[in-house]
Image (cartoon, rainbow, N blue to C red):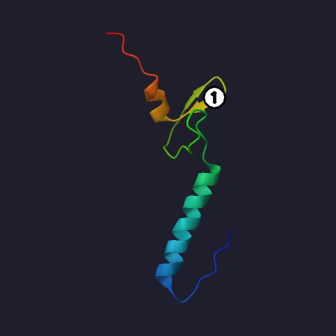
Amino acid sequence: MISMWTDDPVKDAERYAQEQEEEMMENSPVCCECGEHIVEDFYYRIVDDIYCEDCMHKHLEWIR
C-alpha cells in the first residue's frame, strides 16, 4: 500500500506503523491448531503442519 503524506507527521507516522503491522500479519504463517498468525521469529513445523509456541506447549508432557 502506498501512503499519502500529509502536513500531520504524527498521523502519518501512526498510519505508516499500522500499514507495516498489517503487511507483517498478511505475510506471517498461521498456526494450524489455533488459527492465529505467528509473529514470533520462529514456529514449529511437524511434517507439513505449522504450530505456534503456545500450541506446542499445550502438548508438552514431562517424563518425570
Quarter of the figure with residue 7 = bottom right
- Counting from the top left corner in percent of width and height, residue 53 is at 47, 34
Q: Secondary structure at mark 1?
A: strand
Choose between 40 and 33: the one closer to the eye.
33
- Counting from the top left corner in percent of width and height, residue 13 is at 50, 75
Q: Residue at x 64, y 80 (%)?
A: 4
Quadrant containing the C terminus is top left
Q: Residue at x 55, y 73 (%)?
A: 15
* Residue 18 higher or lower than 36, as above or below: below
- Counting from the top left corner in percent of width and height, residue 42 is at 51, 38
* Residue 9 higher or lower than 27, as above or below: below
Q: Residue at x 55, y 71 (%)?
A: 16
For the image shown, how many numbered marks are present on the structure?
A: 1
What amino acid does circle 1 point to? Asp
Quadrant containing the N terminus is bottom right
Q: Residue furthest left?
A: 64
Q: Residue furthest front?
A: 34
* Residue 58 higher or lower than 64, as above or below: below
Q: Residue furthest top?
A: 64
Choose between 10 and 31: the one closer to the eye.
31
Q: Residue at x 62, y 58 (%)?
A: 23
* Residue 64 higher or lower than 15, as above or below: above
Label 1 crowd (10 A; few <14 / some 14-19 / many >=20)? few
- Counting from the top left corner in percent of width and height, residue 45 is at 59, 28
The answer to whether 57 appears left or right of 17 in the picture is left
The answer to whether 21 appears left or right of 1 in the picture is left
Which residue is labeled 1 in the image? 49
